[in-house]
Every structure is written in C-alpha cells, then in structure tokens.
Image (cartoon, helix red, strand yellow):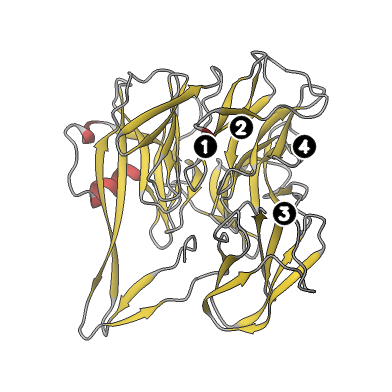
Amino acid sequence: MRTLCMILLVVAAGTAIADEMVSLRPFETPDPLAGWPNAAFSADGSRMACYLDQTIYVYEDGVFTGIGAGDPLNSQIWISADGTVVVSSSAGPNGVITPTIWREADGWAPTHLGSLPDAPPCDNSYGTGYACNEDGSVVVGLAWDDGCQAVAFAWTAETGMVDIGGVRASTISPSGTTIAGFTDNAGGGGRLPVYWTLEADGTYSEPIPIGGDEGWGECWGTSYHGDIVVGEFTDWTVPSQAFLYTEAEGIRWLGTAEDDETHSSMANFITNDGKVIGRSGTSGPWGMMYASIWRDGQGMQYLEDYIVANATELPDGFEDGFLRWTIGISADGSIALVQWMDDFWNTQYYLVEFESSVSIEGEDPIDDIVSPASLQLAQNYPNPFNPMTTIEFALPSTQSVQLAIYDLAGRQVRTLVSGETAAGEHAVVWDGRDTRGNAVPSGTYLYRLQTDSQIRLRTLTLLK
C-alpha cells in the first residue's frame, strides 16, 4: 500500500525484538545560519523545506535550491507529505506579507493566498501560512480578520481563505481530516488546545477543545491520518505537560524525561512508527527545556540520551553540549533535524537518521502480515485521475464497513463497499461514475470510510 503505515515482520518460534540504530551528521548550510532557522520534511524524509536567514530552500540529496524570500518576522515553514508544495509567507506584489505556497509543478513560483474577506493588512501582514495536507490542496494557518484579530484559517483553491474559528491552525494532518491549534481562553486570555475535523460536506467543524476551559495549552501535531493529536496543557495546578489525545480514549499524559512532577514537557510531533517528539525540562525564565522523545512502553527520555544509547557513532564534541530542540521530523520517523548547543550558547545543527531493525530469537521463521493497529484509509492513486482511481484501506479486525463517494455538498454519489469486510488490506477501484452509471463531472469529491465506531475522510479530484 502506498501511504498506509503497514508493518511487515518475520515471525519466528521465538520472540521478535525491535531495535533502532541512530546516526548523526552535521547539517551544512550554504550560508552561516542567522535568525531563527526552521525546517520541515516530506513524509519519507527525502526532501526538506528550510528557512535560513530569511530565504526559503528546498533541500534534497545534499543540494539546496533557493525558491524565494520568506517573511522577515516569522520563519514558519512546511512541506507537503509528497514533497511537492512548500508553505510559508512572503511579500506579495503590494509588499504586504501573505500566506504563500510554492509548487514544484509551477517551477517553485510563489502563489499568494490573499486574505480573509474585507480584512485589511495588520502590521503589514495578511497572516502566516503554517502547514498543508498531503498534496498541498489545503493550507492552514493564522490570518487577521476585519478587526485585526488573529483567527485560524483554512484555504483551498475553490474556497479561498476561510475563517474556521479559534486563533491559530498550527498544523493539519497529511490526510486533511484533522486540523490542530489553539483558541482563546475566554476567562484568562490564554491559549486552549483545539482541533477541527473534516465534515462530510467538505467543510471543517467548529473548534473542539481538549482539556478544561480553565487552563493553557496548544495542539502542535497530528498523526498522518489525523486520529491522534499531540500537544501540551496545564490546568495551572501542575506545570504544562505533554499529551497524546484520541477521541476514543481522551487525553494520555506523557510525563517528563526525569519523571519529575515539577518539570514541564510538550509534544510537537508524532510519527508513523510511534515516536512522539517534543521537549522536557524546567520551565520559567531560568529553566531549560531539552529535546525529548517518547515511546510507548519506554516513557519520556531526553533525545540526547536516546541517541547516545543507540548511536552507531557520535560526532566529535557531541557530548560536550545538549540538544535544545527538534526542528522537524519526517512522518515516517526516519530523519529529524535537531539543534545542538553548548554551555556558551554556540549552536550546531545535525541530521539524525533513525533506522529500525528486527532481530529474531528462535528457529523456523515464517512470513506473516501483522494487521494494522487501527482503521486506515490511504490517499487514492492516481490523484487527480481520469477515468479510474484506486482507493486502499486497512482494517484491524473483521467488521461492518461502508466506503462511499460524496460530492462537496454532502450528497452521496456512489457506494463502493457495504457490508462485513475481513481484517487486512483492501483495494477498490472507482470509475468516476455515480450509482446510475452516469459519469460525474470534473471536481473534488470526498470518499468516506465508516465502521461501527470510526470514520475516515479524504478528498480526491477528477479531471477530464
């Protein structure tokens, strides 16, 4: 399957033991780093978008390609999971900063996304682009309304920029089904973590809060398919804590690297292989937060300790400093960019590569496929398509399933699967026709996978 995170293991008479080897190499840049560098990876880690000294680059195979000037006041940057679209902000023709996308298909020429209806530029800006979905067709971020108040936005080519409520949309799952960020705490003026879900009519829900309304926090990241949200929250009785949230199980607190109740932690990314990447340490004006990693069953660790324990080789001088933060990590968990710092605030940047291995105890191995741990729905391929496209999904257990196509008005176009379906991987072809066999017009459609307890949504595009 092309985008589902399926796990293939060799199962033996003994026990399978998973290990992870780590390697580091310095991240050499075309010019000395200045300002606040930022970076993001494609899903497989083969490409990186990085913001270095107010210039936006695409980095691949050791080569930097400059694609334009960024926002001098905000280094936020993102790259689509397929690596073909970069999201940030830049000055438009009138000199005002606007959320911007650069598409490889357009030769990396900038497309300025404009502003909310009737919104004036505020502080010479219409807002900031923060993230996009798998192919860059949906962009989210922060924009200014007509009263120069910050609001979360979602943008598509069909709708333009739309106010979705809340204050900032910090990220969107590659699947496009979940947006995450924060809204105002009406009582205290602080941030409250919220997320938005994709509805059957193609719009996004009202912001859905996580945690109580008497606290502070933010959602920072989502899983590839949007069913997991990570972030930080405090109700003011304890320091801010990293959390992992699902609709089925609610909040799971991830603790701190030293298991110290006086420390803080935050979760910024979650990868397909189960890493939660963030920071942990002492907060406040004199505190120090360090890059951290959380794995189920292993708890929270300082990322530096994790690397030292698993590294094939450490660069000279690496243990003379500490890892301050993880700038970005690929969705598959294979590569990250980290900032190293010593006690004199000298900095160095490293690419950290993670390579999982499986060793087998026992004899007489046989090949087997482990069912997915959760319901999964892949992006159709090809997309856009004409005249046919394939939709793949995977089930953790045998269950009743409906897979159907809808138009953006929420009208059902065609049912592709209906009834009890076995666990494992499945592929269905849609020929671009409705229930009566009539060819449907070009446009964007939703495909919706529903079981007794869960729903997954994605979009596809028919071009004739």
Query: Left of 123 or right of it: where is 119?
Result: right
Tell me where residue 196 appears, x and y as whole percent: 70, 49
* Nearer-N-terminus badge (4/1): 1
Q: Element at badge 4?
A: strand
Tell me where residue 106 appears, x and y as whole percent: 54, 34
Characterize the local packing of mark 2: few (<14), some (14-19) or many (20 or more) Cα atoms within 10 angstroms: many
The answer to which quarter of the image holds residue 398 is bottom right
**As drawn, 132 above or below 288:** below
Q: Element at badge 1?
A: strand
- Nearer the camera: disc 4 or disc 3: 3
Residue type highlighted by circle 2: Gly
Q: Name the disc covering residue 129, or none.
A: 2
Q: Which residue is mark 3?
A: 442
* Nearer-N-terminus badge (1/3): 1
**As drawn, 107 above or below 311:** above
Tell me where residue 382 appears, x and y as whole percent: 55, 58
Q: Label 1 vs label 2: CA separation? A: 8 Å
Q: Quadrant of the C terminus?
A: bottom right
Q: Which residue is mark 1?
A: 78
Residue type highlighted by circle 1: Trp
Q: Label 4 vs label 1: CA separation? A: 20 Å
Q: Which residue is mark 4?
A: 163
Residue at 72% from the left image edge and 54% from the top image edge: 442
Q: Are marks 4 and 1 in contact (CB under 8 Å)?
A: no
Residue type highlighted by circle 4: Asp
Residue type highlighted by circle 3: Ser
